[in-house]
Structure formats: C-alpha cells, structure tokens
Image (cartoon, rainbow, N blue to C red):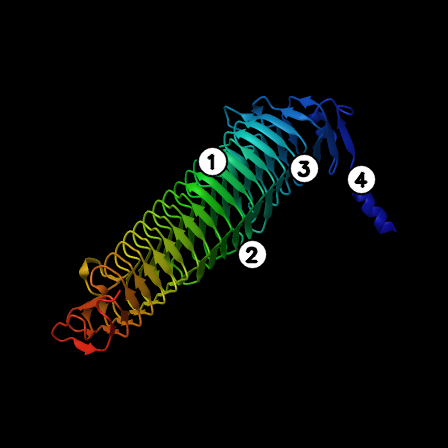
Amino acid sequence: MSLLLAALLACPAATDIFVPGNFLTIQDAVDAAGPNDVVVVTGVHFENVVVTTNGLTLSGKGATIDAEFGGPCVTVAADNVTIDGFTLANGGDQVNVADAVSFTGDGATVTNVTLMSAAGIGIRVDGNNALIENCDISSCVDAAVRLFTPDATSLSYVEKNDITGCGRGIAGTGGAFRVMNNKIESISGIGIELTTSSSNTATRVRSNRVEQTTSHGIDISASGGAATELYFNRVEVAGGAGVFVESDSGQLDIVRTTITSAALGGIDAASNGTFFVADNNVRDSGIDGILIAAPAAAGGVVEDNRVTQAAANGIVIEGFGVTVLANTIKDTAAAGIFYNGSNAKLERNKITGAGRQGLKLVGNNGTLEKNKVSRSAFDGILVSGTSNTIVDNRSMHNGGDGIDLHEPNFVVTNKDNAIVGNKVSNNAHEGIDATGIDTVIDENKVTKNGGSAGPQVAGAGNDVNGDDIPDGTVASFEGNVIPTSGTAAPGDAITGQRLDIGEK
C-alpha cells in the first residue's frame, strides 16, 4: 500500500486548464501548466506559443492561433507534447522563413489541425516517434510536414492528412516511417520524400493519393537494410517519376500502385537487394513505364504489371537474375520489354503495338518462354548474347523479323543459343533471322512471313532441324546444318526438314 501511495504522489493527476477561463492567453496557461496537464482553448488568439513542459496537451475546441507571420504559431522544446483540434494560421516568419509549428523533442503528436499559410514548413519535428494525423494543411512555402528522426530505430507516423498547395508534401529523414492514407495535391516539388536508415523496421507508404507535383510523386532513398513497402498508392500528373526509389540491401516492394502521366517515367527503381514489383498500372509515361536497375544477384520479380502508352520503353531491366513474368505491355514508343543483363527470365508476357522491338534481350544465360508479341514496328523478339533459350513463344504481325538473333554491326559473337518450339507468323521480314555460332533452331512453326519466310541463318555450326515451314524457304551461309530444301553453301551439311513449299 505504501508503494502505491508513493507512486500516486509521484505522478499527480492531469489538470485541465481553460483559456479563456483560468487564463486569458494560451501562453500564460502553458507557463502555469505541469507535466501531463491539458490546456483547453476556445476562441481566436494572436500569439506565438512556446511550450517547454513535457507531456503537455494543447486542445483546441474550435480555437484559432494566428501568428500573423511573426514567428511559429507553436514552438515546442519538450517530449510527448500533443497539439489537437486547432486552426493554425499565418505561421512562420517571412523574413527568416521560420516554420508554422516547430517541435524539438520525442513523441510529438499533431492531430485534427487545420494549418493555413505557412512562411516555411507547416509542421516540423526534430525528434523521434512522431504522429501527424487527420490534419488539413495548405499553402506552405516549404513542406507541409517535415520530420527529422535522429534515432535509426524510431518509427514515425503520418496518416490521413489532406495537403494542398505546398512546396513539398511530406518529407522525412531518419529511422522508419508509416506514411498512409494521405491526399497530397498541387505540390511545387516532391509529393512524398523519405530518406530512411532503419536496420530492422520497415518503412511503409500505403494508400496515398498524390496529384499534380512538379517533381517526383513519391521519392524514397532507403539504407540500413530494412524493408521498404509501397502498396496501393495512386500518382497522377507528376513532373518527375511517379515513383522513384533507391534501395540498398533491404527488401523492396512496389505493389498495386496506379501511375498516370508521369513525365520522367512511371516507376524508376534501383535495388541492391531483393525486390517485388507487381500488379501496378502505369499509363502515359513521359519516358519508360517501369525502369529497374538491379546490379546485384539478390533476385527480383517484375510481375503482372500493366503498362500502356509509354513514350519510350514499357519495362526496362538493367541487371542480373530478374524474373519478368506475366506483364501486359501495350502501345509503347520504343521496346515493349528491354532487358539489358544476364540470367533473365522473361516468361508469359504479352506485348502489343511496340514502336520498336516487342521483346529485346541483350545478355547471356537468359530464358524467353511463352511470351506473346504482336504488331511491333520492328522485330517481335530480338536477342543478342550467349547461351539464351527462346522457347514456346508466339511472335506475329510484326514489322520486322518474328525472332531475330542479332549481332550489332554484324559481328558474330552470339553463341550456343537455342530457338525451339516457337510459333512465328505473318511478320514483314524473316520468320526467324539467326546470326551466331552453334545455334539450335528446332521444332518451330514458321508461316506466312516475308523475306525468306522461314529461318535465315548466318554464322557457323548452327543446326536447323525439325521445323515446320509450310510456305517458306531456309536461307543459309557456310558451315551450317540445313534442310534439303534450303539454300546450301559450300561446307553446309544436309539434314531433313519438314517443308511444304508453296502451300498456304
């Protein structure tokens, strides 16, 4: 019993202090308050309030603090202080560009606040574990919300805020963040900008709507190794990329995001760790729809995305060991999918109306399987490299070759590639045009193409065997294994081929 009494005496009950009522000014009430007290305010007050008491709550019951641009509406130098329910107007200093609300301390909470016309930042917090929620913030010269969290283990929340007409939307630097369910529009900079350093707590950016930014819609730089998760966001009309991410070794997820009219590309991400970019909808990108740079062999998946009307490529992968699976690409100005790197897995993608190649791979040890490519302006599928497998794809109605095993400048370094079991039809040039060494072209069905209609083979040691070519021929150069109906050059071997020349 004596211990309980001592605890109660050490932690006195919180007191409600009323303005007006107990005091005429907010500052007088704050100066008289102790830790954990609540200052309840009504009416309009022309003040610059300073709080130095830990645990204090400022509760506005329809109250307004108008700083008249003479400094911050509220300055806090204490921990665990809450500001709730105020209208805060004309905060900051137009000469010194001070902020409307300025916190120095941990555990800052700002909720249900309407903040208008800040000469600098709307709400600035220098401290850990902040909460900014249900606020309506407009017309800030700089960011609506700016968090600096010095402890890499901290976790701050910015949720359910409505931000309009500011220099930036939400900005955070430090540990980990939860930025969720915010609406951000008409921003003369970046919508959401985070630099994270947590090693064990994920940063989550979810269900935000970002519209009309002059720079990136969402911009994240992640270090420390913790995961970065972007889910269910919507970005419309960005002057930069819709989503721009640089991630170190931590897991990166970009999932179910809708991006429309981003001038510098829909998704632009660089990752040294594993990543999952899936089920995103990207439309009307100023350059590439999705660009992923993945130099490390950590593994990544780009799956089930929809990219429409990109001004350059639909999907670009620069890296190693990435799986590109079941994406739908339509009406791009350049390639539908361009993979520049090794160990690619390009499977079950559907590409229509690419302005250049439908599917382009420059690299080694890749697999292209069960893709469907049609109506590309140039080749349907173009591959350059060594030990790639092109199997069970469909390439039709393209403006160039159906499948082109290509060497730039006609330098033959393609080697040990396999083109097997593909269906190639109605392409303007060759069905299959293969330049290389020791290429296997086997069990393909090649019909109704221009050029030589069937495979055209250049190089040495290539094996063309078992293909179904009902209405074409096979053109070859020296040193290849060709069918009896092909055009043989000195040194070419002869093998059987299913050919029915002339039939349609």
State how far apart marks 3 and 1 are (Cα).
Answer: 31 Å
Specify whether residue 26 is in view.
yes
> Element under label 1?
strand
Q: Are marks 2 and 3 in contact (CB under 8 Å)?
A: no
Hey, what amino acid is under mark 1?
Gln
Decide which of 411, 102 is in the foreground and name it: 411
Hey, what amino acid is under mark 3?
Thr
Residue wearing tag 3: 82
Q: Are marks 3 and 4 in contact (CB under 8 Å)?
A: no
> Element under label 4?
loop
Q: Residue at x 35, y 48 (%)?
A: 332
Residue wearing tag 2: 200
| Horizontal side of residue 6 vs 203, given as left or right | right
State how far apart marks 3 and 4 are (Cα).
Answer: 17 Å
Decide which of 454, 143 is in the foreground and name it: 454
Question: Which numbered dot is residue 13?
Answer: 4
Q: Give coordinates of residue 460: x percent, y percent.
A: 19, 71
State how far apart marks 4 and 1 are (Cα).
Answer: 48 Å
Decide which of 303, 247 is in the foreground and name it: 303
Question: Which numbered dot is residue 212?
Answer: 1
> Element under label 3?
strand
Hey, what amino acid is under mark 4?
Ala
Of marks 4 and 2, the one in the foreground: 2
Question: Which numbered dot is residue 415?
Answer: none
